[in-house]
């Protein structure tokens, strides 16, 4: 476990925060850190800006993220990592499709290789990083397209060489099943699951034998074709299966 | 080169197994270990009821291994059976079970037997959960009772996994004499401290130490127990290379299990160790694995 001092702490939207701090190793696009809040918990967090001081971006929704959101410049932040595989660098015409906090793990790529950014939110007041978003959807129609971001992406009907997707699993599953695969070159998904160890030994994040923390978080469309648990079976902290359909 | 090994009458193609608790909570991961070359794979320890385990941090990385306190997280026997019953690789899957008394162990063992598994491993050794694991495994009478019960009332092969956190492991091994094989060792009871947070490294405070740092402790346990009891032994603790595995085998282990090595070398560890053993036997002029089992203890 390493630690660093927080260089800056910002609120950037409703319940949405950024913390920046310097770390001693290089982080690649798509990788994550395990962030420990002593006395609370340790949680995985993707890195939204890769250059020191690096940034984590999160919504204060659980006990740990709420505590993180109260942290200020100069305070210690504990972390281990970076862990996980990485997104390949885009080469052609790229699209980024994000749902909710999923935008965080796509930000480094968007900065390196701009493309069309599709962003799905629940409601207008959830918007963050509005300046880089090209197409926005909200569930309640208070901003942009009314509906989900996948339907928006399909409606826009553009062709891309590379598509990068990150968001809640049901959204990614819907994307995976719904899009016309032939219209796009490569499609990469960064998955999110309950993670306890972050280093591939506890099996809590596994989908069909693929560990999201170690074999992922980034998987190609065709890998997901082989995972019948993707979007259909979640795991409780105990490892018990929770069937989604 | 024949590196197959026979444990309690059951033949395994190679002597390199996956240890309980490391990437083996889900069926597909267990099968992945077997497809990656593990001679057998032991599941995460399963109890009667669902347990969420401890909150993270559940592991703390050290220069010589790691400390963990997962807290016997498991889905409970019902969901486990439901998921694992469909496996076509049951011959190579050993189900690890834990309970607080012989009644619970028996109930679990019967469920496991019912769906076609042939071997159980008794977790008498997890060091960080109250009322289970090593708290059971430190009590020779209870150990004997549990094993007798299972041997009398099931047809399962019973492997008893012992804790090193006792004064005389040989005494416990003798109490476990009725088991078909002994698995030595579980993790070493340990604590990690973070001086910059002034907190324990793990949520639970107390954990179990695994990885290269405990290999000498495990070797000693295997040697003492083999010499004193002559039981069939599966060695585990800090094995990350073929050399490590051979050390255990020379001291009497008929097979080895690897856990923390997955963290260092991932699933390819199984083939790496098997191939290393084959090369060693060829180079050193042995005919098969059998020739070196316990070679240093005769
Ligand atoms: C994260 C982790 C979880 C474990 N869970 C269990 C378990 O559920 N049941 C058990 O009998 N042993 C468990 N163990 C102990 C291992 O099976 C093994 O005995 C120990 O780690 C020593 O071997 P190693 O150094 O190769 O890891 C666990 C070990 C680790 C590191
Ligand atoms: S979080 Fe432990 S295996 Fe992925």
Image (cartoon, rainbow, N blue to C red):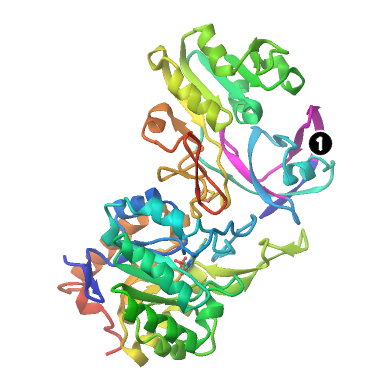
Q: Residue at x 52, y 23 (%)?
A: A164
The answer to whether residue B212 is above or below residue B296 is: above
Given residues A131 and A231, the one toward you in this image is: A231
**SS under mark 1:** strand
Give x and y (percent) for residue A22. 72, 41
Q: Residue at x 31, y 79 (%)?
A: B180
Given residues B169 and B141, the one toward you in this image is: B141
Give x and y (percent) for residue B57. 64, 56
Q: Which image quarter: residue A137?
A: top right
Q: Is residue B140 left or right of residue A44?
A: left
Given residues B110 and B140, the one toward you in this image is: B110
Give x and y (percent) for residue A27. 60, 38
Q: Is residue A164 left or right of residue B60?
A: left
Q: Quadrant of the N terminus of chain A?
A: bottom right
Inspect this view and state whether residue A90 appears.
no
Give x and y (percent) for residue B251. 33, 82
Mark 1, residue position: A9
Q: Is mark 1 within 8 Å of ligand 2?
A: no
Magenta-colored span = A7-36
Q: Is residue A187 left or right of residue B85?
A: right
Residue A10 magenta = yes
Q: How many numbered discs, if any? A: 1
The answer to whether residue B273 is above or below residue A221 is: below
Identify the subunit bearing mark 1.
A
């Amino acid at each position: 476990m390493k630690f660093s001092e927080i260089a800056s702490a910002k609120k950037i939207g409703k319940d949405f925060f950024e913390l920046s701090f310097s770390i001693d190793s290089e982080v690649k696009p798509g990788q994550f850190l395990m962030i420990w809040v002593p006395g609370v918990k340790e949680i995985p967090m993707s890195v939204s800006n890769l250059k020191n001081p690096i940034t984590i971006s999160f919504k204060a929704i659980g006990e740990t993220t709420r505590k993180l959101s109260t942290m200020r410049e100069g305070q210690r932040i504990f972390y281990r990592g970076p862990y996980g595989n990485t997104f390949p660098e885009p080469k052609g015409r790229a699209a980024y499709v994000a749902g909710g906090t999923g935008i965080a793990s796509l930000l480094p790529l968007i900065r390196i290789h701009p493309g069309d950014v599709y962003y799905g939110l629940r409601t207008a007041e959830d918007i963050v990083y509005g300046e880089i978003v090209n197409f926005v959807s909200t569930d309640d129609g208070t901003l942009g397209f009314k509906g989900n971001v996948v339907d928006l992406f399909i409606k826009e009907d553009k062709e891309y060489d590379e598509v990068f997707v990150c968001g809640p699993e049901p959204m990614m599953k819907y994307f995976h099943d719904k899009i016309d695969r032939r219209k796009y070159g490569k499609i990469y998904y960064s998955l999110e699951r309950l993670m306890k160890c972050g280093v591939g030994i506890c099996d809590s994040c596994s989908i069909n034998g693929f560990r999201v923390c170690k074999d992922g978080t980034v998987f190609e469309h065709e890998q997901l074709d082989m995972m019948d648990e993707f979007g259909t079976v979640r795991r409780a902290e105990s490892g018990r299966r929770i069937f989604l359909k | 080169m024949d590196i197959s090994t026979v444990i309690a009458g059951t033949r395994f193609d190679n002597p390199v197994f996956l240890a309980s608790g490391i990437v083996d909570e889900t069926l597909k991961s267990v099968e992945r270990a077997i497809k990656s070359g593990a001679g057998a794979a032991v599941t995460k320890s399963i109890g009667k009821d669902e347990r969420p385990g401890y909150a993270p941090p559940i592991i703390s990385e050290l220069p010589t291994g790691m400390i963990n306190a997962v807290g016997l997280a498991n889905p409970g026997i019902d969901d486990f059976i439901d998921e694992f019953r469909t496996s076509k690789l049951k011959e190579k899957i050993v189900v690890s079970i834990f309970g607080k008394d012989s009644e619970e162990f028996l109930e679990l063992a019967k469920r496991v037997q019912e769906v076609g598994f042939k071997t159980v491993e008794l977790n008498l050794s997890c060091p960080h959960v109250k009322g289970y694991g090593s708290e059971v495994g430190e009590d020779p009478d209870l150990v004997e009772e549990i094993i007798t019960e299972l041997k009398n009332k099931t047809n399962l092969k019973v492997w008893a996994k012992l804790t090193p956190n006792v004064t005389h492991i040989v005494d416990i091994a003798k109490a476990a004499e009725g088991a078909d094989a002994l698995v030595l060792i579980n993790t070493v009871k340990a604590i990690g401290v973070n001086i910059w947070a002034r907190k324990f490294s793990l949520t639970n405070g107390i954990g179990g130490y695994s990885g290269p740092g405990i290999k000498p402790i495990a070797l000693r346990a295997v040697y003492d127990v083999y010499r004193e009891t002559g039981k069939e032994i599966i060695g585990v603790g800090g094995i990350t290379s073929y050399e490590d595995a051979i050390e255990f085998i020379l001291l009497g282990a008929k097979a080895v299990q690897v856990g923390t090595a997955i963290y260092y070398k991932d699933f390819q560890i199984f083939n790496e160790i098997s191939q290393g053993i084959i090369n060693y036997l060829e180079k050193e002029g042995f005919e098969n694995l059998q020739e070196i089992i316990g070679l240093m203890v005769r």
